[in-house]
Amino acid sequence: MNPIIIALLLFLFRLDTLWATSNFSSMDFVLSKATLTQYVHDIEGFPKALGITDRVLPITAEFQLLPGPDNDGRWLGGTYTDPELPAGYVQRLEAFRRGKPSRGCTQHIILNGRLRYAHNPFFGTPLWMGTVAHESIHVSQGILCISSNTEVETMAELGSWLLLAAHADTWEQQTSAIFSEAALIYDLRHRSIQAVLDLYYQAEKEPKFLEYLHLTEAEYLYYKELSPAWLAAHRAYWTDSIILLLTEAQDDGIIQTNYLPSGVLDIQKLLEFLREESIIYGY
Ligand SMILES: [Zn+2]
């Protein structure tokens, strides 16, 4: 088997065990306007503190609630109904940056609110925090985030994991930090599953590994029904990001990039967290 797949599977199974055996999985992640506002307020200064940008971001966020699912379980309305999405299940919570591209990325994040519906496979999970962190890194990118280069997304992904790790580290013992830790583990697990699925389909293998993970029935169906074409089209978000993370774990954790204002992403704090939790080791 491809050594990248083996490394990814080990990484994924460790995350899955950590998620399943911790009390994170039984936490009640109530996604309300109040929690969203509080969380966005909490993370505003982090991109600056991490050297990603030189300014504190006055990010505001809001929900844009969509109509509920139709009889088939598909979501109606808006521009968010994606025909590639598996029937009955919807994609992860998405966040959108508001504003005309010509004005660059603004300081406003809109969450479409899908995770507030019990029907969503990720309802009650901390996935929304990773999404907000991802979008806040896009805000940090400023005008750079308009680029169609896929590195814009890999930097937003790695930056969001770094932000969650830094958040967890800063407010150790506090509830919001524990949530950040849970969100980081859950987000990495989510992305790894998609990355492994992508690599399996490229190698024309059956994704039997899904049966060995601690997935809820809704999660299992969601992952099982993701199409190879859809996974390939979104490769920059997970496969590329997760591989870059594992590569950096063996390197120095300093990534030079044209897609952050600072020109560099230092993910050592993230790697430290992953080592402390024995998610990665031996590097
Ligand atoms: Zn993005």
Image (spheres, rainbow, N blue to C red):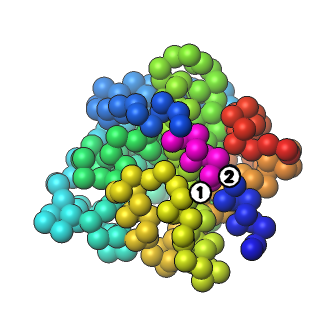
Q: Tell me whether the residue at label 2 lies in contact with that at label 1, contact meaning CB atoms closer than 8 angstroms.
A: yes
**Dot 2 corresponds to which residue?**
11
Residue for point 40% across, 71% down: 225
Residue for point 50% across, 77% down: 228
Task: Report the front residue among 38 and 128.
Answer: 128
**What amino acid is labelled 2 in the image?**
Phe
**SS class of the residue under badge 2?**
helix
The segment highlighted magenta reads 12-20
Examine the residues drawn in magenta and state their main secondary structure. Answer: helix
Task: Report the front residue among 29 and 53.
Answer: 29
Q: x, y (%) of residue 1? A: 75, 74
**Dot 1 corresponds to which residue?**
192
Q: Is residue 41 above or below residue 126?
A: above
**Furthest-top residue in view?**
173
**SS class of the residue under badge 1?**
helix
Q: Is residue 66 left or right of residue 185?
A: left
